[in-house]
């Protein structure tokens, strides 16, 4: 999948961020979204493949899709 072809209302790059910073950035992005809008989050950390879905479950967000594009992992999240 080509990340550039994914339709979303907002994009957030959480690559290279440590500890709680990726989730703080996700929370800030989700906060400004209206219900039904989509957020595309991208990272280069493989560990986020399980962390972001868990975050979505905890925050009652819908994880529409997740996958890889080259060395990046992406998550399409619906508020």
Image (cartoon, grey):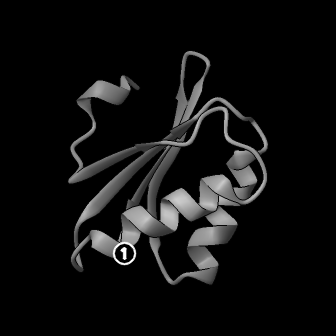
Residue 16, position in %: x, y? 66, 32
Q: Horizontal and vertical percent for residue 25?
A: 52, 57
Determine whether, in the image, residue 16 is placed left or right of residue 42: right
Q: Is residue 51 left or right of residue 53?
A: right
Quadrant of the image occupied by residue 77 = bottom left
Residue shown at 69% from the left, 69% from the top: 54
Residue at 55% across, 15% down: 70
Q: Is residue 56 above or below residue 59?
A: above
Where does the image place residue 12, in percent across and percent down from the top left?
41, 45
In this rendering, the answer to whether 60 lies above or below 12 is below
Toward the viewer: 23 or 49?
23
Q: Quadrant of the N terminus?
A: top left
Relative to 5, residue 30 above or below: below
Residue at position x 72%, y 34% in the image: 45
Please say if 67 is above or below 25. Answer: above
Q: Residue furthest top?
A: 70
Q: Which residue is identified by label 1? A: 31
Q: Nearer the viewer, residue 31 or 70?
A: 31
Residue at left offset 67%, top offset 41% = 17
Label 1 Cα neighbours within 10 Å, binned few <14 / some 14-19 / many ≥20: few
Q: Position of residue 33 (x, y in %)?
A: 26, 70
**Judging from the image, what secondary structure is the residue with disc 1 in?**
helix
């Amino acid at each position: 999948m080509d990340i550039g072809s994914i339709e979303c209302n907002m994009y957030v790059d959480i690559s290279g961020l440590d500890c709680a910073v990726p989730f703080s950035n996700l929370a800030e992005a989700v906060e400004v979204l209206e219900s039904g809008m989509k957020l595309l989050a991208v990272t280069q950390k493989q560990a986020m493949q399980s962390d972001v879905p868990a975050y979505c479950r905890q925050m009652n967000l819908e994880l529409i899709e997740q996958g890889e594009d080259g060395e990046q992992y992406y998550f399409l999240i619906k508020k």
